[in-house]
Image: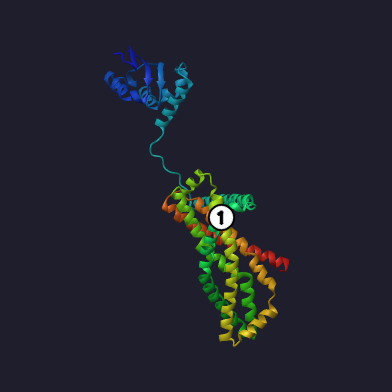
Amino acid sequence: MPSEWIARHGQTVALQGEWTLNNYRHIKAVLMQQDIAKANVDAVTLEAITRLDTAGATLIVELIGIEKARSVAEWASELPKVQQALLIRIAEAMDAPLDVEPPSYSRINQALAYVGQQMAGLWSQQRQLLAFIGLVIATLFSIILQPRRWRLTATVAHVQQSGLNAVPIVALLTFMVGAVVAFLGATVLQDFGATIYTIDLVAFSFLREFGVLLAAILLAGRTASAFTAQIGAMKSNEEIDAIQAQGLDPIELLVLPRVMAMLISLPMLAFVGMLSGLAGGAMVTSLSLDISLTQFMHTLQKDVSVTHFLVGLSKAPVFAFVIAVIGCLEGFKVSGSAQSVGEHTTSSVVQSIFMVILIDALAALFFMEMGW
């Protein structure tokens, strides 16, 4: 019985019409009704097919068999090349084994692959950071001569949040670390009868390293995470998209005030950290070594030059810029979920602390080679 899709002449079957998903059920019913199978079909012609998709190709492959479908180009050259390629692809897919065992890798290969993925991710992350630093600097230079575009209110608010509010914790931490350094120095130097040099140890360590380093690490954990969470929440709520829709620049509006606030806050906090560390050292030397505050100040003035203070303070703006940029960049990377906000907040803290310590180590080598 001929139909819209199948015409049978003896043992020859001519396929015709549209063999598509829309007609799949009807074609399947016709095939079952006429009991057409590859076992009782001598020849099949395809030149009358007008349209063919994946569903129709599957029915044809089931009818003619996988081997014959693979050689369709030899016996059905009148069929368009695209339809021939579709039949061949369906035949190959149907011939593939269903249960494919996943390739097994040794633990060494998995470890090496993991290391490679981490290194590729680190390289991509550093490229993004450099690009974002360039964008921030370019935006800064574009508005530096236009005072009407400065966000003074936002900058002052961030100075209070990241600077003034952090003074107590920075002063307390550096005071305690100064006391610990002085106590350890006194314990070791006492065996050599050189306890007076505990003053020099505390002064050099806090003026050159610990004062600015501890303040930067505290701000990396306290302020960089706040920047990431704030901008990330705005990204999740599509507030940044709204800012861009209004024709405003998110870098100018959100990033530059935070960067400028950090550039102002961290040098001041580093100065507070230096004074607090020296105060902690002075307390320990006074209580444990019977060195009066007057002698402490006299030794400090005689042995320690202002160069060490300037060397330590010169690193503060670099640390501040890196911390602020990383915190803002991770905020812009947030994808929209609360989990993403948490992940990027953690990432900003880790990156900031890592970069601060790395830059501090490179600066120490540089200043040592320069003899400063």
Q: Which residue lies furthest to the right in this view?
A: 370
Q: Is the C terminus in the top left, top right, bottom left or bottom right quadrant?
A: bottom right
Instruction: Give the x, y percent position of residue 322.
Output: 58, 58
State which quarter of the image contains the N terminus.
top left
Numbered disc total? 1
Please, what secondary structure does the residue beneath circle 1 have?
loop
Compare residues 6 and 150 and report the one nearer the observer.
150
Residue 185 visible at all: yes
Name above or below for residue 279 compared with residue 96: below
Toward which corner of the image does residue 76 lie, by quadrant? top left
In which image quadrant can residue 356 be found? bottom right
Q: Is residue 210 something one can see in this rendering?
A: no
Instruction: Look at 56% across and 82% down and name the residue there.
Output: 283
Identified by mark 1, the residue type is: Arg
Q: Where does the image place residue 245, in percent across and percent down from the top left? A: 50, 43
Relative to 51, 314 lies left or right: right
Residue in the picture at 53% in, 54% down: 328
Question: Does 81 appear above or below 315?
Answer: above
Across and down, in percent, residue 68 comes to 42, 22
In the displayed orientation, state which residue is furthest to the left: 33
Residue 208 lies, in percent from the top left, at 64, 70
Most distant residue in the top direction: 9
Residue 295 against residue 130 in the figure, above or below: below
**What residue sits right under mark 1 in the picture?**
151
